[in-house]
């Protein structure tokens, strides 16, 4: 899928539309026929310590209880501890407890076929979130009538937006004027489809615009701030002023990268560019302050509310599409203050 370019001046309008859509979601969900007093929901998040997924699960539980009326005591939320075996045990416990629906953020998206079969055999619908099973698996749900769906955002779009943020700078990323953009890429988990797509499409946005690129380093950072800091610190020692752009697959790693960049005496938007994804509060504030070139709002509000809406559809016995996508929003200095107000 090609993602249409979105220029900086359009991002404020996009953010406003995203906020309005999120506010209208609750009104759009017909709760008639749903036993909110007794319905039980099992939720497992791959790792509670993940900054973005903390925002996501907080909004998910808030929305289910405050807006939709489910009882908090009937919602079990488990920490997968970044251990698929641990999470599979949690899912088995949900099955034993006979929950009515599950919402799962898998540790390993490759485990989806096994997990789906477990849930399907138990007659429990499942809503996968954030980490997308591969297309073969979602095609199977549709072909076999399996009650499973995925809610997320197309990471190709987020990668494209990162690349566009570099193209929108004064130098289009080519700070030293040598005719090419020399970059390092701090990747999340390479098995994760979001990491793969953000890595590919951020650079593709540059090359599609006719910009020559040079990859100095691509290294796995596992979405972790401390690892992001160490990777960029080592890269700055090795490559020095050759590095013009630091791409990070998420804001946690980018915030670590920022620490390394500042410690090395480099200045964001003057002699180096830095972009991330997620629009964490600290990242958006840094964008306002000029310490960040840009980030991409991974709209946890709309995603959490859409996941809840799909769970409700399953509880009502309605048909659910296998894939449900929510748009990202590009965050630059032009609209960062508006995004910050929304997420604080």
Image (spheres, rainbow, N blue to C red):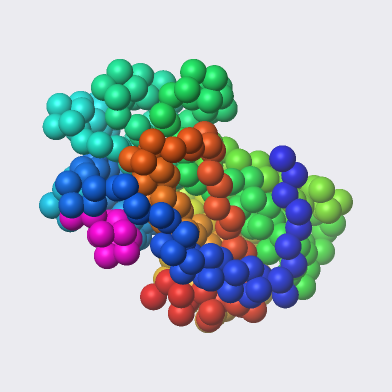
Whether residue 226 is visible here, answered yes or no, is no
Residue 337, position as x, y percentages in the image: 53, 81
Q: Is residue 183 toward the left or the right of residue 137 in the image? A: right
Principal secondary structure, stretch drawn in magenta: helix
Which segment is the magenta one? 61-71
Decide which of 248, 60 is in the foreground and name it: 60
Q: What residue is drawn where x is 41% and y is 29%?
A: 147
Image quarter of residue 163: bottom right
Q: Is residue 172 toward the left or the right of residue 145 in the image? A: right
Residue 77, position as x, y percentages in the image: 21, 47
The C terminus appears in which quarter of the rendering?
bottom left
Q: Does the magenta portion include 70?
A: yes
Q: What residue is drawn where x is 53% and y is 44%?
A: 324
Total numbered badges shown on the rendered structure: 0
Q: What residue is drawn where x is 22% and y is 44%?
A: 39
Q: Is residue 129 toward the left or the right of residue 77 in the image? A: right
The N terminus appears in which quarter of the rendering?
top right
Residue 298, position as x, y percentages in the image: 50, 57
Q: Is residue 202 toward the left or the right of residue 260 in the image? A: right
- Identify the residue at the far front of this view: 33
Residue 286 drawn above or below residue 120: below
Decide which of 281, 203 is in the foreground and name it: 281
Whether residue 181 is visible here, answered yes or no, is yes
Residue 185 drawn above or below residue 244: above
Q: What residue is drawn where x is 35% and y is 19%?
A: 117
Residue 284 drawn above or below residue 100: below
Q: Does the magenta portion include 21?
A: no
């Amino acid at each position: 899928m090609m993602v249409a370019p979105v220029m900086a001046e359009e991002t404020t309008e996009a953010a406003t539309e995203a906020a309005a859509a999120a506010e209208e979601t609750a009104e759009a969900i017909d709760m008639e026929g749903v036993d909110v007093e007794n319905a039980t929901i099992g939720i497992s998040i791959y790792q509670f310590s993940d900054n973005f997924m903390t925002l996501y699960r907080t909004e998910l539980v808030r929305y289910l209880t405050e807006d939709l009326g489910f009882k908090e005591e009937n919602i079990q939320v488990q920490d997968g501890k970044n251990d698929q075996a641990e999470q599979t045990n949690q899912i088995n416990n949900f099955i034993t407890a006979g929950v009515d629906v599950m919402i799962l953020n898998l540790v390993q998206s490759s485990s989806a076929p096994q997990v789906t079969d477990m849930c399907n055999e138990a007659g429990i619908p499942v809503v996968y979130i954030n980490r997308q099973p591969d297309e073969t698996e979602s095609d199977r749900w549709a072909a076999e009538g399996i009650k499973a769906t995925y809610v997320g955002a197309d990471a190709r779009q987020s990668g494209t937006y990162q690349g566009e943020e570099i193209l929108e700078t004064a130098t289009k990323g080519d700070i030293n004027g040598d005719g090419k953009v020399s970059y390092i890429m701090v990747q999340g988990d390479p098995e994760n489809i979001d990491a793969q797509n953000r890595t590919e499409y951020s650079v593709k946005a540059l090359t599609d615009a006719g910009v020559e690129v040079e990859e100095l380093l691509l290294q796995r950072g596992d979405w972790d701030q401390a690892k992001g800091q160490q990777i960029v610190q080592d890269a700055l020692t090795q490559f020095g002023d050759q590095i013009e752009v630091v791409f990070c697959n998420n804001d946690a790693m980018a915030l670590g990268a920022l620490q390394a960049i500042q410690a090395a005496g480099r200045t964001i938007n003057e002699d180096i560019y830095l972009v991330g994804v997620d629009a964490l509060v600290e990242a958006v504030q840094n964008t306002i302050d000029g310490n960040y070139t840009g980030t991409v709002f991974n709209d946890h509000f709309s995603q959490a509310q859409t996941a809840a809406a799909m769970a409700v559809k399953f509880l009502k016995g309605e048909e659910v599409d296998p894939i449900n996508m929510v748009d990202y929003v590009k965050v630059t200095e032009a609209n960062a203050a508006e995004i910050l107000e929304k997420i604080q």
